[in-house]
Image (cartoon, rainbow, N blue to C red):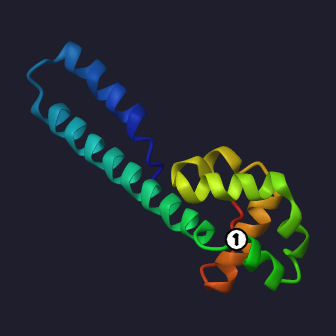
């Protein structure tokens, strides 16, 4: 399944312009909207779980891990980590930062969640 729910909603909406009383189109729109909501909620949970690794003493976590020790004194990274800890939704703004992704992958691996590859 391609899970292109927004496109499907648009197509069914166009269909309703031609057949306003088509119950199948109406039901399909409701189902697609429900799937979009589920995807949105799932994404929010995922980002919240990922942002959780930025809770606590990030600097100490960096000092304790050989691959992250250089980040313990990186003011830019620590500021981003603090922002993510305070506002988990901000994680998405920093996923292009190689140090944020390195820290996140390392911490998720330690939790046995597995590394990120899609970002």
Q: Does residue 6 appear to the left or right of 102 in the view shown?
A: left
Q: Is residue 118 above or below residue 68?
A: above
Foreground residue among 92 and 70: 70
- In the rendering, at what x and y percent does residue 83 appear? 62, 51
Quadrant of the frame with the C terminus: bottom right
Q: Is residue 9 left or right of residue 54?
A: left
Q: Position of residue 64 (x, y in %)?
A: 80, 85
Asked where in the image residue 10 lies, by quadrant, the reply is: top left
Drawn side of residue 37 relative to residue 98, left or right: left
Quadrant of residue 103 within the rendered picture: bottom right
What residue do we see at 60% from left, 55% from top?
84
Determine the residue positioned at 48% across, 49% down: 2
Q: Is residue 5 left or right of residue 31?
A: right
Closest to the observer, 6 or 103: 103
Q: Is residue 119 visible?
A: no
**For the residue labelled by badge 1, is the local secondary structure a helix, a strand or a loop?**
helix
The residue wearing badge 1 is 58
Residue 29: image location, x then y, percent = 24, 35
Q: In the image, what residue occupies the spot 20% across and 20% down?
A: 16
């Amino acid at each position: 399944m391609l899970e292109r729910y927004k496109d499907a909603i648009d197509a069914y909406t166009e269909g309703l312009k031609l057949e306003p009383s088509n119950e199948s189109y109406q039901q399909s729109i409701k189902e697609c909207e429900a799937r979009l909501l589920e995807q949105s909620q799932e994404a929010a949970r995922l980002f919240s779980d990922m942002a959780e690794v930025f809770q606590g003493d990030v600097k100490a976590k960096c000092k304790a891990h050989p691959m992250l020790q250089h980040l313990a004194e990186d003011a830019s990274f620590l500021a981003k980590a603090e922002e993510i800890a305070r506002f988990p939704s901000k994680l998405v703004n920093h996923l292009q930062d190689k140090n944020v992704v390195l820290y996140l992958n390392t911490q998720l691996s330690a939790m046995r969640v597995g590394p990120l590859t899609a970002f």
